[in-house]
Amino acid sequence: MADSIVIIPTFNEIENIENIIRKVFSLNVTFHILVVDDGSPDGTADVVKRLMQEFEGKLFIEERKGKLGLGTAYIHGFKWSLARDYTYIFEMDADFSHNPEDLIRLRQAALDGADMAIGSRYIKGVNVVNWPMSRVLMSYFASVYVRFITRINIQDATAGFVCFNRKVLETIKLDEIKFVGYAFQIEMKFKAIKYGFNVVEVPIIFTDRTLGESKMSTKIFREAFFGVIQLKLESLFKSYK
């Protein structure tokens, strides 16, 4: 039994999913993988189920009907993982924007005492490859905005490459998580810090996808912008003991 599981949410990732799975399983540290697929019409789930025969007991899939959002996919995966004996539970994209080899570095940060280890694009300058400058600036200043509103000292608040110690996910009330897009990532970091957990940023290089399509939308950005204010206001009336 591995102590680490990587949750990969998918929607139309047939061009990437087999390669990312094989890369994770080629690492010299053992990780299991849970794919949470939101009814991809391109056959992503079929590829995973074929690979499950090859990687029996290491690769799992949870299929959901329809595109229900990144945040709910991760919460589904968190609950699935907490029902098993995993100590370290990871979030990672399917499109190689997160380098699977950095899973080892995030896990080591957790072994060294981090309750939540974040793969950060901005802890050492701006480490982003293949993004247009407009998107780099939007992402960077989104984190500046989050720090200003929430007063949490996280350089990459919208990062989606994360390792959680299971005790963080057991403490945060997952059924009360409100947001589904990038605001979900902000909310998880904000609540982990408010509960007093040790949150550490690990520098990574983020490379934009070369295959498939981005899921970014105006709706997701709007949710993050206004969600940060809502998070801060609600925290003023909430106990995190």
Image: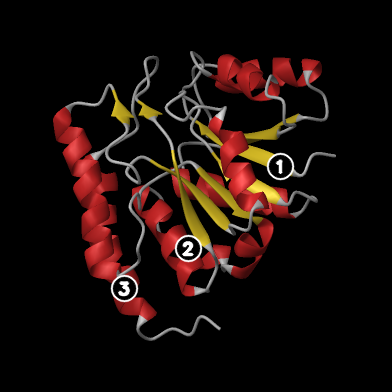
Vertical relation: 163 (above or below) 173? above
Tell me the amino acid under the disc marked 3.
Answer: Lys
Quarter of the image containing the C terminus?
bottom right
Dot placed on the residue nearer the N-terminal end, 1 or 3: 1
Tell me the amino acid under the disc marked 2.
Answer: Ile
Q: Is residue 170 visible?
A: yes
Dot placed on the residue nearer the N-terminal end, 2 or 3: 2
Report how far apart the C-alphas of labels 2 and 1 lie in the structure. Answer: 23 Å
x, y percent for residue 74: 54, 47
Count of numbered labels shown in the rendering: 3
Tell me the amino acid under the disc marked 1.
Answer: Ser
Task: State yes or no: discs 2 and 3 in contact (Cβ < 8 Å).
Answer: no
- Near-viewer residue (199 or 1): 199
Splitting the image into 4 quarters, where does residue 140 fall?
A: top left
- Near-viewer residue (200 or 135): 200
x, y percent for residue 61: 68, 32
Report how far apart the C-alphas of labels 2 and 3 lie in the structure. Answer: 14 Å
x, y percent for residue 63: 62, 34
Any mark on residue 4, and which? 1
Say which residue appears at 56% left-offset and 27% top-offset. 100
Quarter of the image containing the N terminus?
top right
Task: State yes or no: discs 2 and 1 in contact (Cβ < 8 Å).
Answer: no
Report how far apart the C-alphas of labels 1 and 3 lie in the structure. Answer: 32 Å
Element on which disc 1 rests: strand
Q: Is residue 47 left or right of residue 151?
A: right
Any mark on residue 177, and which? 2
x, y percent for residue 71: 47, 49
Dot placed on the residue nearer the N-terminal end, 2 or 1: 1
Say which residue appears at 68% left-offset and 24% top-offset. 27
Residue at image mark 3: 232
Say which residue appears at 21% left-offset and 58% top-offset. 145
Any mark on residue 50, and which? none
